[in-house]
Image (cartoon, rainbow, N blue to C red):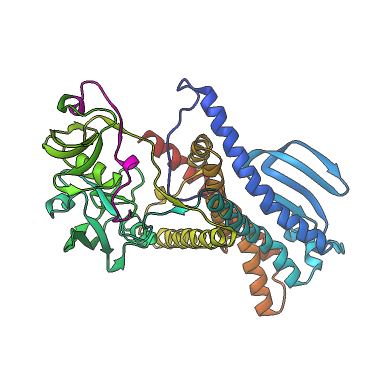
Amino acid sequence: MGAPGGGRSPLPGGGCVSEFLLTLFWFAVTLGVLVVFHEFGHFAMAKLFGVGVESFSIGFGPRLIGFRRGETDYRISAIPLGGYVKMVGETPDDEAAGDPSALGARPRWQRFLIFVIGAVLNIVLAIALMTVVFMRIGKPADAADAPPLVRSVTAGSAAEARGVRAGDRLVQVGGKDASNPVTAIEEIFLSPGTTKQFVFDRNGKRITADLPIGYDPKYHSGDPGLQLASGVSEAPAPPEATTILAVSAGTPAEQAGILPGDRIVGVDGRAHPSRPELIALISSSPGRSVTLQVERGTEILEILVTPAVMDGAGRIGVEFAPYEGPRIPLGPAEAFAESLKFNRENATLLLVTLKKLVIGDVSLRVMSGPIEIATAARQAAGDGLDSVLHFMAFVSLQLGIINLLPIPMLDGGHIFILLIEGILRRDLSVALKERVMQAGLIFLLLFAGLVISLDLIKRAS
């Protein structure tokens, strides 16, 4: 039903009906586009091979609205959690009808293409959408492959006891290169209850620590007692990255004499920190004085400030100027290559997650159900077109891969049966296929009910 993630938005009864309706709208738009694309693949391939199509439905359950053209009923149904194309002879008990337009009358290779094309189109759509995104926004000029930065360390955690500090760079986890974004998720997020060897770099010095990975209280995912920021380059931060836009009244920054327009060029002797490094060093110093080197006009001032404790981290009460970092523009070919990389990494993460779910290494809580997906769709819409395309690509890729799993009722289940029949060189009995499909339907209904329940539990936690 989705991937690790989540968020929070008010529901009816919480005083924000309009927000709920917007969330529902963007969920329907996002899922609707992906489902139409997926089901159109089945529809078009079936028509190409002369298979009759009885209905093309967005959603499941009772028919709400629609129209009939030829033999096909195009409809929107009541439950907006997917969709389907109903082909003549698709269900096992229809195969004996002898209709030449029935799905069962087609060769196995044609049935294979009919079932596989929906997932293939979802994967193709994910690649196409991310190609557009990379063409629009480029990619960060900062070293994307740099080791991730420790943004903060949880007070009282094993990481703090082992001497890990904000500003350290994570080089390896469990013997794997932490520069690869898959590593942190596989070796930390998806490995709760284990102990891993962490290797950090601190100003050129290697530090090794064996850290127990605990459980995040909400998702029951891995929590090593430290928070990571993405890799940033070692080049000096550009002026806009650490320039102060505003200073809140009554905060440590105001009391220390920091002014809007000041630029922080050093902290505790570390020159030209990047914005993530600066935030990490301040947030890890609640109640402890730090010395800031501040550029004001042509002067460099040293200002002593003591971060206040807010939400368990140090804050000084400043707002930085808007800054997203330099980006490299990409042409179509380069954007396509970045899209392939993005989708390959996310496909790997999904498969690793599914593997760990099956063997019981992680809780089903790490998966997002319809409620969390709807919330994420609303948040993406609020962040603009690029975020919407990015989110749709992410969900489309997962929809394509999950549909290829050998689960009855999903496309992968039909494909798996076709492969077995191809090996046996005969069709399986109608009764056996019916029982397999019934079992698949029960499994999917139970799974959907479970992830929806977990969505509600996570929202309450």
Could you say where residue 315 lies in the image, as x and y percent from the top left?
Answer: 22, 33
Q: Looking at the picture, how far across and down is residue 98, in whole percent?
A: 86, 64
Q: In this view, does 153 lie to the left or right of 444?
A: left
Pinpoint residue 123: horizontal percent, then vertical percent: 60, 59
How many numbered discs?
0
Residue 332 picture location, percent across and down = 59, 58
The quadrant the C terminus occupies is top left
In the orientation shown, which residue stands out farthest toward the front?
298
Near-viewer residue (303 or 355): 303
Residue 130 drawn in magenta: no
Q: In this view, does 362 lie to the left or right of 408?
A: left
Residue 322 showing in the rendered view: yes
Residue 399 at least partly seen: no
Q: Which of 439 and 420 is in front in this view?
A: 420
Say which residue appears at 17% left-offset and 53% top-offset: 164
Image side of residue 370 versus residue 242, left or right: right
Residue bounds of the magenta highlight: 232-254
Q: Name the image quarter holding residue 111.
A: bottom right
